[in-house]
Image (cartoon, rainbow, N blue to C red):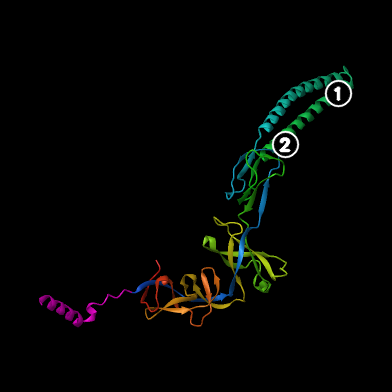
Amino acid sequence: MRPYLNLIAIIVFVLCAPWPAFAQPQMPPAKVVTAPVTEREVAATNQVIGVVDFDKVATISTQVEGLLSALAVKEGQLVEKNAVIARLDTEALQKDIEILQAQTKQLDVRIANTKRNAERFKQLYQQQATSERAFQDLSDEYQGLLAEKQALSKRIERIELDIRKSTIRAPFNGLILAVKKYEGDWLSPGSAVCALASTADVVVMAAVSEDLIAYLQPGDSLTLSIPALNLRLSGVIRESAPVADVKSKTFNIKIAIDYVDNLLQNMTARVEVPVSEKAQRKIIKRAALVRFNNQDFVYTVVDGKATPIPIEIVGYDGEDMIVANGAIQTGMPVVVDGNDRLRPDQPVAPVEKP
């Protein structure tokens, strides 16, 4: 009987003991970082899909013929202006120069001899010891030899120019899109070696409705993103096509952006295009956004607790969201760090962002 009495005593103690003695300790408030809702003059935007393109692509060709002896680039490589792209074999050209230089030396000897004879015949002619014709023939021969030497010099300069042009260089900073020739290929003047895209002329091409033409002017800044690179950046409208598509009633715009590593031609871009005039609108940091069950909302802090507020996003501006919701007030604190782990009415303690 004694074990049963002990068990009964334990049960009575548990039932009669005050509950707080067995309650779990309460978790401390979650530390979060907040930022105030601001307001500024911006336009509502809509997202359109565009593609990355290079507005300036050059087909790098050779000006002289020859055997491609060295290719210094590969597809996807970045090159700087004047960087070597390829070299042609110049051994035969170097030999031609050596031959012409040897001919020039031989010609120098003839020129020197002819000059001495012309000077001697000049004295004889002045002394009436020779005919004018003999003197004139030597003078003409001397001038002809000088002209022949000048022609040889020009031929050497031309071959030296061909040698310099046998080294093919990049005309601007760019990205090698495609290589078309390789070592061992024979190149003729105009043969394409590679395609080079200028990294200073990167654009996003996007088709937008003709109804939005009033909100899109050259020089305007637009916010866009490259999903594949998880990148957000700003671009400037460079120009727009003067022709609208007959069926879709859209026209193309070019948005100039800075080149970044791993950016590919035809990569998808998402562009925030203005769809209204500018007006005073509420601004919230993108980091405050929380999505749950296809609903967009943010957390504010009320009486030390996380309080969710649904929002309607009407556009983006850089790192900011443009929202339209009467419950969102200017100056209201919204959680921008730590919001991903919050629950409604959870105690929070705002802290300064380190």
| Residue extent of the magenta highlight | 1-28
Amino acid type shown at disc 1: Asp
Q: Is residue 15 magenta?
A: yes
Q: Within the image, what quadrant is residue 48 found in?
A: bottom right
Q: CA distance from mark 2 to mark 1?
A: 31 Å
Count of number-bearing discs: 2
Q: Within the image, what quadrant is residue 269 found in?
A: bottom right
Residue 273 percent location from the top left of the image? 61, 70
Amino acid type shown at disc 2: Arg
- Residue at point 18%, 79% (across, down): 11
Q: Quadrant of the C terminus?
A: bottom left
Q: Nearer the viewer, residue 34 or 248?
A: 248
Residue linked to disc 2: 158
Q: Is residue 231 above or below residue 119?
A: below
Residue 189 percent location from the top left of the image? 72, 42
For the stretch drawn in magenta, the main secondary structure is helix
Q: Quadrant of the N terminus?
A: bottom left
- Numbered badge on residue 137: 1
Q: Nearer the viewer, residue 142 or 311?
A: 311
Residue 21 percent location from the top left of the image? 22, 78
Left or right: 139 in relation to 292: right
Residue located farthest toward the front when viewing the structure as drawn: 1
Q: Is residue 332 above or below residue 246?
A: below
The answer to whether one can see residue 75 in this image is yes
Instruction: Please tell me which of labels 2 and 1 falls first in the chain.
Output: 1
Q: Secondary structure at mark 2?
A: helix
